[in-house]
Image: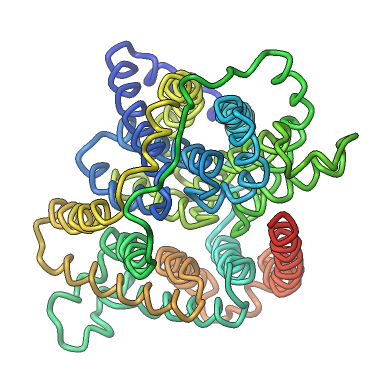
Amino acid sequence: MEVLFGAMIEGAGILFNPETLFITILYMTGGLLLGMFVGALPGLTTLTAMAILLPIVFFLPPIFGIPFLLGIYKGGIYGGSIPAILVSMPGTGAAVATTFDGPALTRKGKGRKALEVALFSSVAGDFTSDIFTIFAIVPIALIALKIGPPELGAVLFLSLIVISATGSGAFVKGLLVMVLGLFIAMIGQDPIGALSRFTFGVFELRSGISLLPMLIGLFALSELLLNIEKKASAYIDAKLKVREGERLTWAEFRSCGRTIMRSTVIGTSIGIIPGVGQVVAAFVGYAAAKNASKHPEKFGKGELEGVAAAEAANNAVNGPTLVPMLTFGIPGDNITAILLGAFIAVGMRPGPQLMAEQGPQVFAILLAMVLANVLFLVVGYLSIPAFARVVRIPKSLLMPLTIMFAFAGVFAVRNNPTDLYVLAFFGGVGYVLRKFHFDVAPLAMAFILGPEIERALSQTLSLSKGDIFGYIMFERPITVVILVLTPVIAWYLWRRSTKLRRESLGMANQEE
């Protein structure tokens, strides 16, 4: 415990070095602006922006590159609320619940109030959950340090099953995609014996599938291909008089205080559960606010509390999703899969040893994440009028440029033409899977975690000296407990997440 708290103090020293702090602030500010810009564009998601800009991290020290991506993450989730409030078109899935009251407030001439309460609620939820993340990560990291290869392998296997169960598609489809991801992870050299496998005689595959082009293709390129299919007007016709609108008063914000606190707790709790995410948190936070209100009939007709509830909940998810990723190397959703790729790219492999080996760097990044909320408040408040006009940018201009940046970024990292083929291949794979309503997240998670599971299994076989059943049963009973509980936990979370999504869908249909 003392070592981790010492690492926290040392991490603060790294971040608050004047030169480092200044450069970190510049990168985080740039990330926030880019995130808000992309979030304000209906059709482009935060995930797409993070995936396409991921190559930048390869050329930066961790203390600059990771906060840059975290800035995109935070700015993008809030940015999605801008078109949701102004023109009833959520920029991200997390902002769907914001459309229930945001547009009604805009029609009443209170668009500026709605944007400001969304900003302040987002910052409050995000800041509180980030503080929780820093203090929660210490005890969980201590537990992670005490587990051996058998327990780690069992936990990683459990996480894959849970992610498949709580994904956006059917459980069986999630399992099929997970198996596909495990197979792709085995292409190349065996991590233990360095023997080639599943290369099919292709020399370029001997080193395996590169993580960066796979992630960008699977998440970003497939999303862009799906968006190209959707017909959209060249410009959104809207009279956005945001600059001249009424400002939010302190009394109005204070009246939303209890709702923001409730939604923050809801979002933080949901953020810890792998595979659930911001969309569900926003709907649950909104439903809780409506049920607790003395005037529930006002919700859906232009209620500031409705906007505050949704935005505080979806932003409170951001921090807690990093806890399992950093301590066990388990990405809880698509965005943390991108962040995991970023950590690996800069030489910081998330897992039980990360906090022990590179604790100061990790805490410096986490403290930067908290600092980003202060920048978020300032940058967001000053740029609301500018980003309110972003919704008018034509989609026909953005899509080709975004695809071009995706290919250019992938090639710039290694100057390897093979990476472009990998990008295009996984873009096609992601597109086909999503067209047939498969969730691509289990594939990415299995690809990332597969080598770690294989390594843990190999070490367990070595430790057991040929009697793996007896070794696990009598010397590693915790492993047995995890393996026995795996189907039970997966079944419960599948039922729970399915129920939450049905309630969210029912609420969306009612509001429409």
The answer to whether residue 138 is seen in the rendering is no
Relative image position of residue 12 (x, y in whole percent): 45, 19
**Quarter that holds the C terminus:** bottom right
**Residue at 62%, 19% in the rendered image:** 248
**Residue at 65%, 40% in the rendered image:** 104
Q: Is residue 235 above or below residue 215?
A: above
The answer to whether residue 102 is seen in the rendering is yes
**Viewer-side residue, 355 vs 218:** 218
**Viewer-side residue, 351 vs 19:** 19
**Viewer-side residue, 507 vs 48:** 507
**Residue at 41%, 63% in the rendered image:** 448
Q: Is residue 23 above or below residue 66?
A: above
Identity of the residue furthest to the top in this view? 18
Identity of the residue furthest to the right in this view? 294
Relative image position of residue 79 (x, y in whole percent): 46, 38
Answer with left or right where residue 380 lies relative to residue 429: right
Relative image position of residue 269 (x, y in whole percent): 71, 45
Q: How many marks?
A: 0
Answer with left or right where residue 275 lies relative to residue 462: right
Q: Classify residue 37 by image quadrant.
A: top left
How is the rendered protein coloured? rainbow
Answer with left or right where residue 277 lies relative to residue 8: right
Identity of the residue furthest to the bottom in this view? 200
**Quarter that holds the N terminus:** top right
Q: Is residue 20 above or below residue 186?
A: above
**Residue at 29%, 43% in the rendered image:** 346
Q: Classify residue 267 by image quadrant.
A: top right
Relative image position of residue 277 (x, y in whole percent): 60, 53
Q: Classify residue 477 by image quadrant.
A: bottom right
